[in-house]
Amino acid sequence: MGERGTLNIPPEPSENNSQRSLDYTMATLVNLRAKIDANKDSGNSEPAESHSEGYWYEWGNMDNETERISCKQWVARIARLSTTRWMDSPSEAAKWEPAMELAYDVMSLLNEYGVPKQNYKHTALWNSDGSRVAKNDGGIYVQEVGFVQADLGGETWDSSVVLARRIARGAINVSRYRRCIELGCGTGLLGFTVAHVFAESSYVDLDNATKSDKTVVMTDYLPTIMNAVEEGVKKNGFFDLGLVRPALMDWFDIAEQAQLMKDRGNVPIPAAHYLDESEINRLSARNADGNINFFNRLDPTESKGSFDLVVAADILYEVEQCLVIPRLVDFLLAPAPEDISSNDDIVTVPKFVVTTSLRSTHWAEVSEFEAEMAKITDLVLVSKEDASRLSDMTDWIGALSGRHADTVEDGWVDVRKAMEQDEGDSRQYRTYVFERQVMA
């Protein structure tokens, strides 16, 4: 122990530690929160004046990425431990609750520390006749938060652009579907595109906020991504429609729960593989200043077989994910209708649509995914198409010109601009369409 008021290492309370260790932890959290608040207001990264009594660990400069990461890891450990003790030991709940709440608060401040103001990215989309979609300046707005804050989900990947274009123009017709879930939504371009089609097909009035009877559940595992999606819901005019519902989702947890439901019929509280528990609890309580949190963790019991459409883009980049995604889709997708011959305009066949980039470094993942999907015999592959961004647009415009020449000519400037951007991307993208069918 150094001079009075400071510790040489961060305190690490445990289930068996004394009250003194917990007091050290609380003092460290109090001073850390005061330091971050002071830095945010003044722009000064020097230590703030002490705001607690007793002993605490003085964290260093939060502008130093290594120091900030170490600090976040420590706060996350405190949050997990205090939450566990608060939930599992009713007799000690009052003892651990202050540390739990303070750790969530500090984690929130650390996650926001140094994060620049986010900007919206606009992606142009076209209808089947070549005209621009009617709302949102002819496309979809998304908020990109970057790799540091949101890992791979922080930017819009080209696979989602390819699939969003096809869905918007009806090349893949989703207009008759009612409940869609997107796996790994990232910035939200794909899910928002489906929501746009749903709004158009159910005659929703975006200007007057007419409620929709359709739903798009957009899922990812990082709360930072869900925050950006929440803002995109508002920016694209979906907030008041009841049309889009963001939800935190850990694929591996849901797959485990699916197996438990199949084997034993019970669903315990999930133990997250990816989800940050402290951030989940903080976000669940956020409801001030109109910044209402309307997403939470996806409920397995409510989700089993409840979606007639599952969509995804660029999710096949790890073998472990390629093994679990087919099981996940099988669990979420609704049963096949017994009879689709009577009225095909009303009955829809449950469908899974996914587009992935064909990277030379990820052929093993693609092969693994195809092999695992083949094991689910009632999910039948009905289409597999490879195209580049440019060839997809070129083929579409070529087929369209003869039928809608005037519309295409009016919108040609926008189309040409998009195709010029597409020329810089030489990669191929594969789009799979699977349908759930009744097996003989």
Image: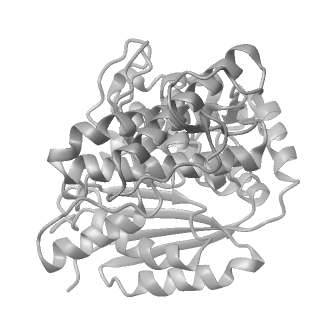
Q: Nearer the viewer, residue 72 or 270?
A: 72
Q: Nearer the viewer, residue 259 or 109?
A: 109
Q: How is the image coloured?
A: one colour
Identify which residue is drawn at 39% across, 38% down: 99
Quick check: 21 above or below 372? above
Residue extending farthest to the left is 265
> Could you tell me which quadrant the C terminus lies in?
bottom left
Quick check: 134 above or below 354? above
Q: Position of residue 195 (x, y in %)?
A: 44, 38
Name which quarter of the figure residue 388 lies in.
bottom right
Q: Nearer the viewer, residue 208 or 216?
A: 216
Name which quarter of the figure residue 117 lies in.
top right
Question: In the picture provided, is 150 more to the left or to the right than 167?
Answer: right
How many numbered badges does the structure rendering display? Answer: 0
Q: Position of residue 116 (x, y in %)?
A: 73, 29
Quick check: 330 above or below 297? below
Question: In the picture provided, is 419 more to the left or to the right than 16?
Answer: right
Q: Nearer the viewer, residue 155 or 181?
A: 155
Question: In the picture provided, is 333 more to the left or to the right than 111?
Answer: left
Question: In the picture provided, is 291 more to the left or to the right than 302?
Answer: right
- Residue 245 in sight in this render: no
Identify which residue is drawn at 48% across, 87% down: 371
Identify which residue is drawn at 48% across, 22% down: 237
- Residue 394 in sight in this render: yes
Q: Position of residue 156 (x, y in %)?
A: 67, 47
Identify which residue is drawn at 32% across, 57% down: 15
Q: Position of residue 396 (x, y in %)?
A: 68, 52
